[in-house]
Image: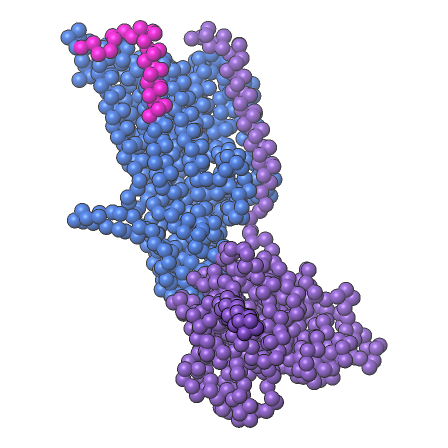
Chain colours: A purple, B blue
């Protein structure tokens, strides 16, 4: 009897497992999202981009930052509009962040930079819809996340590592790092194993710049930081794996040719928003990426997520939750565009870069990589799969009413033309029904 | 043939002297036929083809007044023209939005004009000439073609014909009520289309040339005041919209724009559209019935001569601009043939000093020939277009609606289009509900219609992805090979990919049916 029950239970479990295991190598997904594109921009906080966005968790009332934590009389800096102010690359090392967070007080953003001979006042600057109108339009029409944290209390590389592998780097460099990473699975290994197509699109990709050869490449060395796979020997040496790391031109070509992979990672290069670059260039770049996806055959089955890798030294008022010794770092801007994304929705689910892994793992039924992505929240709340796919829309690069047309005074039109018509009908009617006019006609005729 | 004397040998097809009762019955029968045939010719395959550019603009304006979503943000309410027709159409659009409704409204104005033409002919010359005039207008290709379209000219001609009818009543009675009614009619004519004001010249010419129709100055002032009151909504609404400069800009543009057609344009296009036989009958009537001339002919001739002279001189020419003369010519033709159908009327030949009697049969035969010729002409003109060329004002644009509908269904909202010229841009905007800009629109305000927005730097706009689609069309390309080449240059430069093509079936030199692309939509990738 017990054996029979156990057998029945096992059979049921098998059936149930079969029931839920819908995503597999044949490309089945748990959601209507068949293509997920995620792009990592650079170095801004949520408050820096959306601190004044109505309805979001932006600057609290009365926000001000002491210029010097040890000298209260040195004054305070309130959030101020950056506009076209020249900006510098603010210090965003782990040690800077420690001082800026100041044991949870979140009041060292200016003083930490001042102590590093930078103009700390800049950290309190912010952009708004005058500067990044397209992003605000995206927020108005799709999903803005206001609880999306960078994964690490650190700069770019750590956060990019969480983005692809769900773990931090080990602190080593070069060969030492590569040796460590040899045993680290990435999401792309999982996708490869499952037969799920993927590509890592890199703007201005130069395959010769890897961890092995950083001799004289100057700023282009950032490619190795922003594409963590270029630190993995297997992604460099295995032709099959390395063929997935491609120039961004292929993204546009793939959209046109119907070859968009199921999972696509994108990083910028020249169009990075990493200070001292103004956001405008990057914003136009992102607009083009989204626009091409929007008009492609994939619109009804794709989602595009825009993230920022770290806080870049900018102020953000939310104390990052302590999930482990490495994170989280400060909040970063995050946007989601999809035919299934909610309309003008602010999603306050607590997320980080491993939430991206979580979504991919959930959608394609892939095993988690590490503890972080296992425990991360998914962002399914940002979607409404009950609704049919939304009509594709090109969002403009300008804010406000998208028309130069003057508002028509329709009431005046109806009144004035109605009056003219009535007056004419009365005049003509009077002539027809006026006895004198008719009598006159009879007489003359 | 004309000198055929009345002979008893001829069969008495029609009664030689139509008894009053049978004339009434015959006139009513002809009027009924005119209205029925008028309806048929105006609704047959009415919506087989989508709007042309002018129709798209006026319907777009009406949609903007009615607050139709999307279109109200694309089409400006205020352009150069007054908006009586658009106002009326907007009331329809408040209930239901459809391109067919716009054309049906235009048709109803056309049918109204047929009836008023009958009344005009009846007032001036009697029932039978009136009925024949109505029949000629009902069948006239010029009026048939224009009154099937959402154009301002159809309503304008309706009110112009009402005006001349009111004047005819005034001429008969000398009662100021009719003069005031005529001034109200002229006001509505202007509110339909500003070119209607030209007919004020016709009225003054008539009053000046017909001293038998006496008008007191104070009556004339009162009539003018009433007309100004009726016209007032145009400037009032313009000012309320803060756009008083629009009218000025448009006037400057009209004054300085280059001629769009050669001087023989009207001579080549209008007589065949009115019907050469109709014009011949009208002119012949003026000659043969010279002795019977009165203020009536002065009124009708002034109604023809003034607009013809003005638009011949005016650099901008449009196929439909001379339509107000059509009902009047129909009445003049009806006058001769109606009179000829009545045997008791004799006709004198000027200079010969002879009085001739034309047998009614001849009149009916001539009437039959006219009816047949203009009827066939109309029938041909309302068949779906099979040409890749297009004359503004002559009908719908092949493939335009289909291309626009494809855009509406397949292109992301807020996408922007570049077309060769504004004509296709208007059609894409109306049916596709996406913004479209004509490449040929000059950045120089003196050289463009003030309603249109130029693309100052098309290359930059494409490069920055502000314009994502380019549209080539054979109609605009035939008019401007320069801008056609320019647009195709951008297609090549920015990796254009044809995503939609509209074609029509034409015949090659060997007479084989071939598909010819008329509209091609390209996606461009900077």
Image coordinates of residue A189 in percent, x first then y, are 49, 80
**Observer able to see residue A424:** yes
Please tell me whether residue B103 belongs to the stretch shown in magenta. Answer: no
**In this view, which residue lies farthest toward the front?**
A1
Please tell me whether residue B13 belongs to the stretch shown in magenta. Answer: yes
Which residue is nearer to you in this view: A276 or B39? B39
Q: In the rendered view, would you say A214 is above or below A204?
A: below
**In this view, which residue lies farthest toward the bottom?**
A176
Side of A148 where B207 appears, left or right: left
Side of B97 where A415 appears, left or right: right
Q: Quadrant of the N terminus of chain A?
A: bottom right
Report the span colored magenta. Answer: B11-37
Image coordinates of residue A308 in percent, x first then y, are 60, 73
**In this view, which residue lies farthest toward the right?**
A73
Q: In the rendered view, would you say A119 is above or below B332?
A: below
- Occupied quadrant, residue B238: top right
Which residue is nearer to you in this view: B98 or A272? B98
- Occupied quadrant, residue A78: bottom right
Provide the major secondary structure of the magenta segment. helix
Which residue sits at x=46%, y=76%? A194
Which residue sits at x=52%, y=36%? B95
Which residue is nearer to you in this view: A290 or A27? A27
């Amino acid at each position: 009897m017990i054996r029979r029950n156990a057998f029945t239970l096992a059979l049921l479990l098998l059936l149930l497992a079969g029931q839920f295991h819908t995503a597999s190598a044949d490309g089945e997904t748990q959601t209507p999202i068949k293509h997920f594109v995620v792009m990592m921009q650079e170095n801004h906080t949520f408050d820096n981009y959306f601190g004044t966005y109505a309805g979001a968790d932006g600057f609290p009332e009365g926000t001000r930052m002491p210029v010097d934590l040890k000298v209260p009389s040195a004054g305070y800096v309130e959030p101020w509009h950056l506009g076209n102010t020249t900006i510098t690359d603010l210090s965003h090392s782990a040690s800077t962040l420690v001082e800026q967070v100041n044991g949870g007080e979140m009041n060292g953003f200016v003083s930490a930079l001042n102590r590093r001979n930078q103009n700390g006042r800049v950290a309190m600057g912010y952009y708004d819809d005058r500067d990044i109108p397209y992003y605000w339009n995206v927020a108005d029409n799709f999903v803005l996340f206001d609880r999306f944290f960078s994964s690490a209390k650190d700069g770019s590389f750590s956060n990019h590592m969480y983005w692809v592998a769900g773990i931090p780097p080990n602190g080593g460099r070069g060969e030492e790092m590569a040796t460590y990473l040899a045993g680290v699975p990435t999401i792309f290994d999982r996708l490869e194993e499952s037969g799920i197509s993927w590509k890592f699109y890199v703007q201005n990709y130069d395959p010769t710049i890897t961890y092995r050869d950083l001799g004289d490449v100057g700023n282009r060395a950032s490619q190795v930081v922003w594409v963590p796979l270029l630190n993995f020997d297997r992604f460099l040496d295995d032709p099959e794996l390395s063929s997935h790391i491609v120039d961004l031109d292929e993204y546009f070509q793939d959209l046109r040719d119907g070859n968009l992979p199921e999972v696509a990672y994108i990083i910028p290069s020249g169009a990075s928003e990493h200070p001292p670059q103004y956001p405008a260039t990057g914003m136009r770049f992102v607009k083009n990426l989204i626009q091409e996806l929007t008009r492609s055959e994939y619109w009804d089955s794709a989602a595009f997520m825009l993230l920022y890798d770290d806080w870049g030294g900018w102020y953000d008022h939310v104390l990052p939750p302590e999930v482990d010794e490495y994170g989280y770092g400060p909040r970063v801007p995050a946007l989601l565009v999809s035919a299934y994304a909610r309309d003008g929705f602010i999603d306050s689910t607590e997320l980080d870069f491993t939430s991206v892994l979580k979504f991919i793992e959930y959608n394609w039924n892939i095993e988690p990589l590490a503890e972080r992505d296992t425990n991360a929240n998914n962002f399914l709340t940002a979607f409404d799969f009950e609704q049919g796919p939304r009509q594709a829309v090109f969002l403009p690069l300008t804010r406000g009413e998208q028309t130069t047309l003057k508002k028509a005074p329709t009431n005046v039109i109806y009144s004035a033309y109605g009056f003219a018509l009535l007056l004419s009908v009365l005049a003509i009617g009077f002539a027809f029904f006026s006895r004198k006019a008719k009598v006159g006609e009879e007489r003359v005729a | 043939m004309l000198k055929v004397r009345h002979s008893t040998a001829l069969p008495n097809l029609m009664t030689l002297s139509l008894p009053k009762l049978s004339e009434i019955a015959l006139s009513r029968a002809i009027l009924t036929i005119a209205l029925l045939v008028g309806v048929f010719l105006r609704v047959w395959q009415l919506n087989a083809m989508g709007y042309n550019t002018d129709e798209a603009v006026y319907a777009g304006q009406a949609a903007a007044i009615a607050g139709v979503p999307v279109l109200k943000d694309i089409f400006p309410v205020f352009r150069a023209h007054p908006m009586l027709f658009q106002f009326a159409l907007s009331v329809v659009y408040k209930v239901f939005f459809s391109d067919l409704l716009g054309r049906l409204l235009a048709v109803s104005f056309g049918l109204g004009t047929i009836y008023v033409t009958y009344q005009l002919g009846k007032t001036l010359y009697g029932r039978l000439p009136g009925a024949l005039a109505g029949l000629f207008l009902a069948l006239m290709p010029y009026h048939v073609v224009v009154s099937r379209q959402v154009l301002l000219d159809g309503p304008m001609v309706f009110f112009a014909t009402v005006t001349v009818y009111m004047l005819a009543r005034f001429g008969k009675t000398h009662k100021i009520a009719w003069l005031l009614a005529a001034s109200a009619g002229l006001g509505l004519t202007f509110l339909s289309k500003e070119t209607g004001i030209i007919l004020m010249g016709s009225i003054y010419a008539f009053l000046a040339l017909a001293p038998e129709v006496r008008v007191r100055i104070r009556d004339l002032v009162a009539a003018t005041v009433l007309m100004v009151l009726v016209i007032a909504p145009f400037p009032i609404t313009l000012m309320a919209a803060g756009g008083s400069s629009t009218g000025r800009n448009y006037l400057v543009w009209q004054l300085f724009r280059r001629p769009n057609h050669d001087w023989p344009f009207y001579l080549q296009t209008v007589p065949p559209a009115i019907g050469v036989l109709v014009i011949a009958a009208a002119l012949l009537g003026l000659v043969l019935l010279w002795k019977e001339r009165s203020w009536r002919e002065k009124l009708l001739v002034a109604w023809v001569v003034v607009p013809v002279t003005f638009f011949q001189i005016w650099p901008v020419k449009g196929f439909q601009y001379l339509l107000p003369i059509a009902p009047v010519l129909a009445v003049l033709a009806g006058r001769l043939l109606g009179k000829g159908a009545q045997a008791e009327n004799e006709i004198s030949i000027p200079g010969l000093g002879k009085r001739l009697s034309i047998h009614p049969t001849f009149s009916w035969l001539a009437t039959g020939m006219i009816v047949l010729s203009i009827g066939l002409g109309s029938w041909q003109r309302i068949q779906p277009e099979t040409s890749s060329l297009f004359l503004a004002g002559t009908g719908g644009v092949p493939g335009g609606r289909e291309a626009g509908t494809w855009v509406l269904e397949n292109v992301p909202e807020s996408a922007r289009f570049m077309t060769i010229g504004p004509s296709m841009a208007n059609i894409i905007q109306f049916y596709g509900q996406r913004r479209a800009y004509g490449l040929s629109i000059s950045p120089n305000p003196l050289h463009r219609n003030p309603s249109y927005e130029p693309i100052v730097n098309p290359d930059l706009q494409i490069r920055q992805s502000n314009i994502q689609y380019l549209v080539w069309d054979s109609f605009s390309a035939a008019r401007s090979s320069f801008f056609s080449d320019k647009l195709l240059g951008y297609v090549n430069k920015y990796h254009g990919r044809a995503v939609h093509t509209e074609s029509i079936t034409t015949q090659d030199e060997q007479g084989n049916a071939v598909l010819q692309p008329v509209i091609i939509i390209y996606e461009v990738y900077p």
